[in-house]
Image (cartoon, helix red, strand yellow):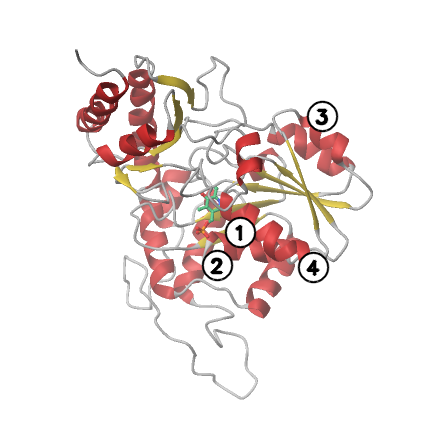
Amino acid sequence: MKKAWKDETRAIHAAAKFDGGVGAVSTPIYQTSTYRLSAPGDESGYVYSRTANPTRDALEETLAALEHGTSGFAFASGLAATNAIISLLSPGDEIIAGDDLYGGTFRLFEQIFKKFNLNFRYVDARETKNIEDAITDRTKMIWLETPTNPLMHLYDIDAVSELSIINELLLVVDNTFASPYIQRPLDLGADIVLHSLTKYISGHADTVGGAVVVKDKILAEKIGYIQNAAGAILGPMDAYLSLRGLKTLALRMERHSENASKIVEYLQTKEIVQEIFYPGLDGKPLPNKMTLAGGMVSFNLRSDIETVKSFVMATSLFVLAESLGGVESLINHPATMTHASIPEDIRRARGIGDGLVRLSVGIEHIDDQIADLETAFKIIENKVKPKT
Ligand SMILES: *Cc1c(COP(=O)(O)O)cnc(C)c1O
């Protein structure tokens, strides 16, 4: 890989050396568990696929290149990657997290790790001061997801990174919503980047995976050790699918963002839409050197839960489904779907009410996307204001 290459080029060519010795242009799927050794105890090459596999290596190198890190690690899911990161900590340690989080991350923290005496504190991280105020001498890690799921909160990675350096904390950024094409947290001072590969990176709703990327050598050794020792690795077929997805990431993110911003304009014309959540919507410039606003849009409908349910069931191009980031458009009702694992009082207090709808805007033609939403609006507008 040439150092001078731009990210679009790296996405396609970073893994070229894994050609199977036959000049394969596409990285082969090395569907093998073990490898022939030249002598007993020889560990100079591949030994066992939990430790390393060439297809997974190709993906991990490409991810590291795109996130401007030194080492990448691929896991069985985004949550398996989260699990590996938290395994860096010890009982008694404290983690400060931005309070708008993927529901499954919150569940993992609260239901699994809390009982190992790890303490999670949630703050509104849109004000860096709130993080600073929460730091104690037991704090070891700051956990930010930005833009957040589902309210699109944006945090100042640069400023939080300064805090983390002064206080010797690890700063983790879940970069799933932005993808490395839009935002590169390691460039802004983060120590660890996390991805659910399931989303924009694989991009076609056909695989589940997760990744960790770091810059620091010692941290890389620790994560690599946990990956092998705990064993929640990504299989070769899934590594291949994520690697293939990465090759078109740049094109897809451009179109996701273009379509999403047109949908935001359309939503702004709707009386029944109370509030829209989309990066850059408030007229402020995008933070964190984000190159685009991305493909995720949330909004509140001014109506009761039954009407909101009819709305999300009335679209057909926008498929009612969990997950996001694929070429196909999806619609989701966070309160009863992706964020149902957050207790109702906490969920409501964080602004995820019954009226909230989340769109993962795909790359279909914008006219078809808007026509589909228009059908759904017509149905509920008739319900809310019956025609006389
Ligand atoms: C989906 C998601 C995860 C979890 O990833 P899985 O691959 O589903 O385990 C973590 N963070 C964010 C922001 C997500 O959207």
Residue 72, visible in the rendered structure: no
Q: Find out whether the residues at labels 4 and 3 contact each other: C-beta distance under 8 Å.
A: no
Please state which amino acid type lies under the numbered disc 1. Answer: Val
Residue 33 versus residue 258 in the image, above or below: below
Q: Which residue is mark 4?
A: 116
Q: Find out whether the residues at labels 1 and 2 contact each other: C-beta distance under 8 Å.
A: yes
On the rendered structure, is 222 left or right of 3? right
Q: Nearer the viewer, residue 378 or 132?
A: 378
Residue at left offset 25%, top offset 34%: 363
Distance (Cα) linking label 2 and label 3: 33 Å
Residue occupying the far right of the picture: 137
Mark 1 secondary-structure assignment: strand
- Between disc 4 and disc 2, the foreground one is 4
Q: Which mark is residue 75?
A: 2
Please state which amino acid type lies under the numbered disc 3. Answer: Lys
Q: Which residue is mark 1?
A: 212
Residue at left offset 16%, top offset 11%: 388
Distance (Cα) linking label 4 and label 1: 22 Å
